[in-house]
Structure formats: structure tokens, C-alpha cells
Image: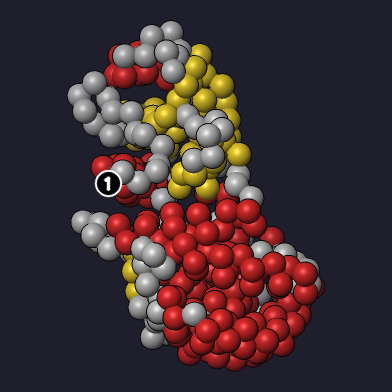
Amino acid sequence: MDEKTLQDILALNYGIESPSLEFLREGGTTTYIVNGRSKYLLKVIGSAFSDTARQSASIMRYLEGNGFPVPKTILTKSGETIFETEADGEKILIVLMDFIDWDEPELEKCASEVGRLVGRFHQLMEEYPSELVYRDKEFFIGRYIEFLRKKKYPRIKEYEELGERLWDKVKNLPQGNCHGDLHRGNLLQNADGKIYLVDFDTACKAPVMFDVMVMCDMTDYFNLNQEDIELTKVVYREFLSGYVGYHKLNREEILSFPHWVAIRHFQLQATILEIYGVDCIDEGFIDGQLFWLNKWQEAIPGFTEELEEKNGRETEYD
């Protein structure tokens, strides 16, 4: 959709006269910064992403209505969250929100504050009125195994056995409405230090510990080292000190953290292959990931022992 058309839409439907548009990024959704009477973020969403865009907008409005820090959605003149139009025969959705001039927060310095934010998010999402897609073993483990079968990966048995062991550790954990992609890039910290949560396209029903792990995992995806493992422990403890004030976790959930770190590698690899195709990685890359996972399995007992010790001394987590 050309810039002049977007400017007309903003003027006619949002009352923003003579705005200038600055292209920001492209990735299925085209995003612009809009400079008008104020500064806005404009998302132009194609039909392939319309369902997730509607879900994300709905969650943002729900959270905003409950005083949770998300960017404010700008409604159309008729009070709609999303403006619908067409371009070249394709349905296009327009979402406009306040622009936040931001930096990604340094989690090492504000883990407890982020824990409070995420705990409050999970607490509020318990009452979210719409049903979210359910994510189970097939999503977290099975998708990647199936890709490995397609690639005829020779060591697939090792992945299959590890996947079974990992899922057995988490399969009975409590479910909740999750963000689904709660990495640090989805936190925005403005100049005043206020932290916002964004991007709810992948929200789902799953064990809430998946969200907790994604936020607190400080390990390098390609190179596992002890320094990052120790940092992960520190961040996780600090995060929990804020989180449990809003959303309680039982002992099994707390101790499941290192298993979710490994499961994340299965889940993320599958998502990458879905986006870029099965040929985007080779056997050497898959071997490297298996080496990482096996090395991580060696670190789990020590990680869990420290969590057990912490949970035994301080009972506020459960």
C-alpha cells in the first residue's frame, strides 16, 4: 500500500492531517512511524496475519482497560480498534498506536521489576474473555521431530528420546494464558524508566513457565558457557522475587525451568524451519544444537539443586 493512500486513511479515519510516514520494518506486517500532531506506530497487516493481528489488538485493549502498561491503541473516528480496507484485492488491516521512544531494558538490572510486570500480566490474563489456541507437546516438541524426519537426520533417535524425557518433566504443569514469545525484545522501556509489554501475536494457552523461562534465559543459543548459566540463575531468582507477588508458582513449576530451556530449542528450531523452509539449516547445524542440548543436560542437576536449596530456605515462591 503506497504512502499517499496511508496518509489519506489516517486523515479520513483518524483525523490526523498531513502526517509524514517513516518506514520502520517489514516482516509480514509493514510498520511505520507516523509523525502528526503526536508520534504514532502504524502497522499495515496483510490477510495472512489478520487473525493474529485481531488477537493481538484485542489483548492490548483488554490490558489497557485494566491499567496494564501497553502502548495505547488509537481508535478510528467510529471507535474501532482496527480499520479494514483492501489493496490489490487483498484485505488489509490498519492498527495505530502511540509510539514509545524506547530502549530494551537491561534485565540484569531490573529482573524483579520485570517479574512483577509478567506476574501481573499472567494474573490479568486469567480473566481474558476469549479463548486462545492451546499449545501442547506437538507444538513444543513434535514439530521439530517431524522436520528432522523430513531431513532424514541420522541421529534423530537422540532427539526423540530427549524430547520424550523433557516433556515428561513438564506435561502436568498448570496451564495459563501466555504471551507465547516473551523475549526481552518485547519489552519497551521509555525515557522515564517505565516498562511496557508488546506483541501479543503468539499468545496461547500453555504452561506459564514457558513465558517465565523465555524471559529469564540468559544463555547463548549457540554457545553454552558457565558464565551465562550463572547469570541465568541470578536473573531467574530476582525475577521470581517480583513475579510471585502477583502469580504464584508451585515447586514443580519452579524446578521445571531448566527443562523449558531445552524445550525452547526444539520449539524455536521448528518455528525457524516453518518460516524459512527445511533447507535453511544443514546436518552440521543440527549436530551443533544436539551438542548444546546434551551439554545443557549435564548442567541441569546443579541448576536444579540450587533451585531446591533456594526454595527450601524461602517459601514465598510457593
Callout 1: helix, strand or loop?
Answer: loop
Query: Which quadrant would the C terminus be assigned to in this image?
Result: bottom left
Q: Residues within 10 Å of mark 1 (few under 14, many from 20)?
A: few
Q: Residue at x 44, y 18 (%)?
A: 38
Camera-side residue of 290 and 229:
229
Q: Indicate whether 120 appears above or below 151.
A: above
Q: Which residue carries the number 1 mark?
A: 66
Percent position (x, y) of residue 157? Answer: 64, 90
Is residue 44 visible in the rendered structure shown here? no
Q: Residue furthest front?
A: 313
Here the colouring is secondary structure
Percent position (x, y) of residue 41? Answer: 46, 29
Q: Residue at x 64, y 72 (%)?
A: 233
Q: Residue at x 58, y 53 (%)?
A: 110
Q: Residue at x 49, y 67 (%)?
A: 241
Percent position (x, y) of residue 16? Answer: 37, 14
Q: Amino acid at mark 1?
A: Asn
Camera-side residue of 44 and 199:
199
Is residue 165 visible in the rendered structure shown here? yes
Percent position (x, y) of residue 9? Answer: 35, 18
Q: Indicate whether 29 appears above or below 250.
A: above
Residue 223 figure quarter: bottom right
